[in-house]
Image (tube, grey):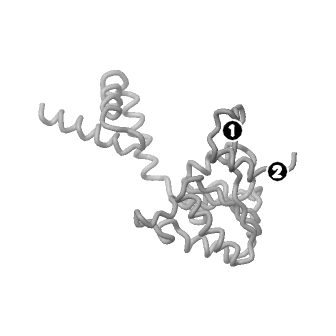
Amino acid sequence: MADARNVLDALKEALRRLPGVGPKSAQRMAFHLLSRDREGARAIARALTQAADRIVHCKRCNNLGEEELCAICASPRRDRSLLCIVETPSDLASLEQSGAYQGLYFVLMGRLSPLDGIGPEEIHIPRLENLLDEGGVKEVVLATNPTAEGEATAHYIGELVRARGIKATRIAYGVPVGGELEYTDRSTLARALSGRREA
């Protein structure tokens, strides 16, 4: 019985590694998978093992994929003069789902946070600089998140980009479609106003 408890505790601890999953959620997931969906648990285990064994970082942009070059970097249809900087692969996926951007990307895998010991090396800035120095990029779109660290990261990269004579732009943040001004916070409204464009 002690062995079963250790295995169950190990499963709960493993589930807690997921973002936003605390002890109670991990316990609920573990009990659900073991009580009601053993085949689902096996499918998750197989998929995780395959992904951990086969998924790599793209050698050009740092995105996740199964090949040395991700599908975006390998595509001849992408505009190679545009480079969008994002913090994570999930940010890249969100921008891709919008269908509004057809350039290439660079995934930082984080953002500058000196208090946490995350500097330029940890977010692959030397690789980004090498990419910019290869030539061909005419505009860098800074799409880091609108947090203090995200803004600091965008500012830092913007300086590097402009020092190379490349145009640096920042995505605009504002009121979401369907949102009402009355319920929108001040900083979002300020961003929406400063990021306005011709109608």
Q: Which residue occupies the foreground of this view, 176 or 139?
A: 176
Decide if residue 29 is on the left or right side of residue 151: left
* Residue drawn at 50 percent across, 59 percent down: 110
Quadrant containing the N terminus is top left
Would residue 21 be visible to someone looking at this image? yes
Q: Which residue occupies the foreground of this view, 54 or 189?
A: 189
Vertical comparison of 39 with 68: above or below: above
Residue type for callout 1: Pro
Q: Which residue occupies the foreground of this view, 158 or 11?
A: 158
Residue type for callout 2: Arg
Label 1, secondary structure: give it: loop
* Residue drawn at 30 percent across, 27 percent down: 31
Q: Residues within 10 Å of mark 2 (few under 14, many from 20)?
A: few
- The residue that label 2 is drawn on is 197
- The residue that label 1 is drawn on is 176
Q: Earlier in the sequence, mark 2 or mark 1?
A: 1
* Residue drawn at 74 percent across, 69 percent down: 137
Residue most extreme to the top: 36
The answer for how far apart the CA atoms under marks 2 and 1 are is 15 Å
Residue 94: give x, y in percent of width and height: 63, 45
Decide if residue 23 is on the left or right side of residue 149: left
Vertical comparison of 24 with 85: above or below: above
Q: Are marks 2 and 1 in contact (CB under 8 Å)?
A: no
* Residue drawn at 82 percent across, 50 percent down: 197
Vertical comparison of 1 with 65: above or below: above
Quadrant containing the C terminus is top right
Number of labels in the image equals 2
Residue 71: give x, y in percent of width and height: 64, 54
Decide if residue 155 is on the left or right side of residue 165: left
Q: Residues within 10 Å of mark 1 (few under 14, many from 20)?
A: few
Residue most extreme to the right: 199
